[in-house]
Image (tube, helix red, strand yellow):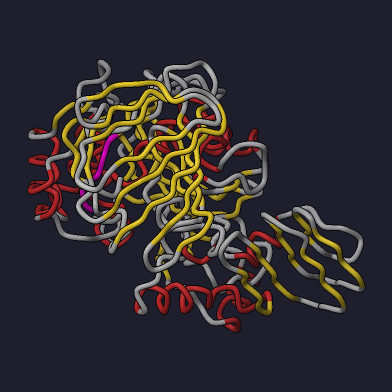
Amino acid sequence: MTAIQPIILAGGTGSRLWPLSRELYPKQLLNLTEDCSLLQSTLKRLEKLPGALAPVVVVGESHRFLTLNQIKELGTAGSIDIILEPVGRNTAPAICAAALYCRDRVDGDLILLVLPADHLIRRQQSFYEAVGQAVELAAQGRLVTFGITPHTPETGYGYIEKGEGNSVKSFVEKPDLATAQRYLAAGNYFWNSGMFAFSEAALLAEMEKLTPAIHASMTDAVDKGVRDKDFFRLHRESMARCPDDSIDYAIMEKSDRVSVIPADLGWSDIGSWQAFWEVADKDEQGNVLHGDVMAVELTNSFVRSENRLVAAIGLTDTLVVETADAVLVAPINRSQDIKQIVTRLKKEGREEHMLHRTVYRPWGSYTILEEQAVFKIKRITVNPGVKLSLQMHHHRSEHWVVVKGTARVTCGDRNFLVLENQSTYIPCGERHRLENPGVIPLELIEVQNGSYLGEDDIVRFDDDFGREGSNS
């Protein structure tokens, strides 16, 4: 049986699903349609794929611990390789790096199956059948893309024009509505899914021929890469020199070896709230309601509550999404324009595009309860048996009150336990460390006081997670 090496691209941010998706907690890590995240759903889908090896996941450094934790939840940590991209350089370098990383993994040729981590596929058997067809073509040296059978004149996707047999006649950009309607009527145009299959040898040969700068840079990035505990870290300087390009532009639109497999998979990239609404289960009035929602005379709308009661009256074709720190309201057909809000948040130096009130770290999480100019209040949760870095702050002091569990605290030369309903004070400039020695999560309230309370006011002296810098 042909060996299939799944490559999972998990480096996106999903800004069009703001305010639920944030730069440091992106779409692929969210539970949107199931009791697991889109990344976990993608990994579970591959467990029953005949001939599939353990996947390789390519992820950015800022998402590495969240990705590792989600893999551990599936019980597959250790068997799945995680490649860290020190800088983002689009899909062509990421796929090239994964192919180079998997060199000599099996005797004979290896078929790479490239899948985004954040797509929804409802028809799993159809997916397995399409992969089987793609692998046959890939074994013949073809570079295969999966074309999704369109059911509507979608203007948010690029299209693939199919020629004779499985040949690709052209790749076309996102069309206007009239053009999309023409594509749908023609019957030989398919949505460009961003899923691919090709042999390792064929891909690398085309990379070296068609985009030699990417091939050379990523060869250097892999050869100089290092193992970092649970991760393989690509060489930063080599990757920084690499051109930024997608696999479509770099290879698929230039190669004469490209084929397409048409597939009707119940597929969606969930690239916008409208796309999510279209594939989600609806009530009799066409509404998608999630969380604590009270709806009166609501039709064809999407209302999602994460934290509190949301009441909606007399709305049609409307999108409402509530999180702890933001509420989005828009016509559902304007959901593609949410990027304008994200761009404005960045321009104005705000953090709502990047972080939720609850921020996840490799040791647990913290939630910002209140923040003012000279003080900040957090609820901190530390996982059992885990400790934070040994660190100090230049501009703030901290007061910790344990509300659940037991804390082991290092403060200067002292090392002591703090029990429930007890507290301790960390002076500004003092080296300190927090540890959970128990078997249940440690929860505490932290009150920060100082002239500057940013997360980058951290100097680390020792860290179990190998973190450098101050905001990871």
Image position of 32 (left or right of 53): right
> How far from the left and from the top, in percent, is residue 294?
86, 63
Q: Which secondary structure is most common in the magenta stretch?
A: strand
Residue depicted at x 47% and y 67%: 158
Question: Eyeballing the image, is 323 above or below 206?
Answer: below
Q: Quadrant of the C terminus?
A: top left
Foreground residue among 185 and 16: 16
Judge whether residue 252 can be spotted in this image: no
Q: Start and end of the magenta stretch? A: 83-87
Question: Eyeballing the image, is 368 above or below 227?
Answer: below
Judge whether residue 453 can be spotted in this image: yes
Image position of 388 (left or right of 21): left
Foreground residue among 462 and 158: 462
Residue 309 sits in quarter: bottom right
Foreground residue among 325 and 161: 325
> How far from the left and from the top, in percent, is residue 313?
86, 75
